[in-house]
Amino acid sequence: AQTVTQSQPEMSVQEAETVTLSCTYDTSENNYYLFWYKQPPSRQMILVIRQEAYKQQNATENRFSVNFQKAAKSFSLKISDSQLGDTAMYFCAFMKKSGGSNYKLTFGKGTLLTVNP
Amino acid sequence: GAVVSQHPSRVICKSGTSVKIECRSLDFQATTMFWYRQFPKQSLMLMATSNEGSKATYEQGVEKDKFLINHASLTLSTLTVTSAHPEDSSFYICSAIPGLGVGGQFFGPGTRLTVL
């Protein structure tokens, strides 16, 4: 079974600064996907970024980028130029690539990020 | 693209009644949908996987007879909470997968259920 650990229950950052959220995972799979989801106060889950394990290049989406370290099983999210609208709960998630998983996601417990003005 | 809707967004019901929540994929077909439950300040807990045209697969500890799932078309899955009790009060979220699923799950806005 897979596990996803987010060791930072809460974090805060000043507007316009950079913040990094940590995520580690445990799996015996070699092919898989990793995701960061954002859940703002509206509680709508929003996909922020995804990473395919077989790709060495770190994924980026505008101000969001990841540091994917496959050997260390680490998948951190960096948010640059933080904005007030980035205030949300952030969930790291794992998905097996194949074989009977039916595309299930394994979620971490989440990190509550507050961006301060 | 990849928009998922849920209805209703909020529902209040009396103990002992049944409540149906609908989940629709608006701009794609979804052979697989998921139902989650989320308690305040916690992560999402997967309740069941809903497959179009077949029986849902429930996670361990989730009562099949209490949480009825129907996935009758490629764009609609429903969750019925039968004989609801106050402990069933929660935030229920559905998600769906477009295409081959490698893009991840896309989530509905959630339904707040309050059982009096």
Image (tube, coloured by chain):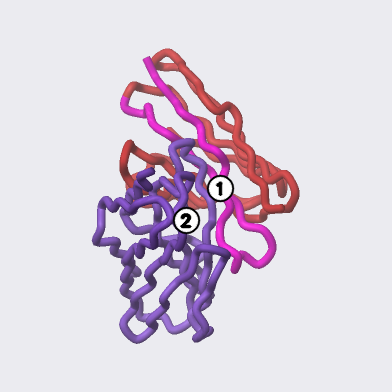
Chain colours: A purple, B red
Magenta residues (range): B87-116
Classify mark 2: residues with Cα within 10 Å, few (<14), some (14-19) or many (20+).
many
Image spot of residue A56 (x, y percent): 50, 86
The image shows residue A19 at horizontal and vertical percentages of 36, 61
In depth, the one of A74 and A101 nearer the eye is A74
Q: Which mark lies nearer to you, 1 or 2?
A: 2
Q: Residue at x 48, y 76 (%)?
A: A32
* Residue A64 in the image, given as x and y percentages of width and height: 50, 64
Residue A106 sits in quarter? bottom left
Task: Give the numbered dot on residue B107.
Answer: 1
Q: Is residue B70 magenta?
A: no
Name which residue type carries label 2: Tyr
Q: Are marks 1 and 2 on the same chain?
A: no
- Residue B107 among those drawn in magenta: yes
Q: Is residue B105 above or below residue A50?
A: above
Residue B72, numbered label: none
Q: Which mark is residue A37?
A: 2
Left-right relation of A18 to A33? left
Q: Residue furthest right?
A: B27
Label count reads: 2
Q: Position of residue B65 (x, y in %)?
A: 44, 35
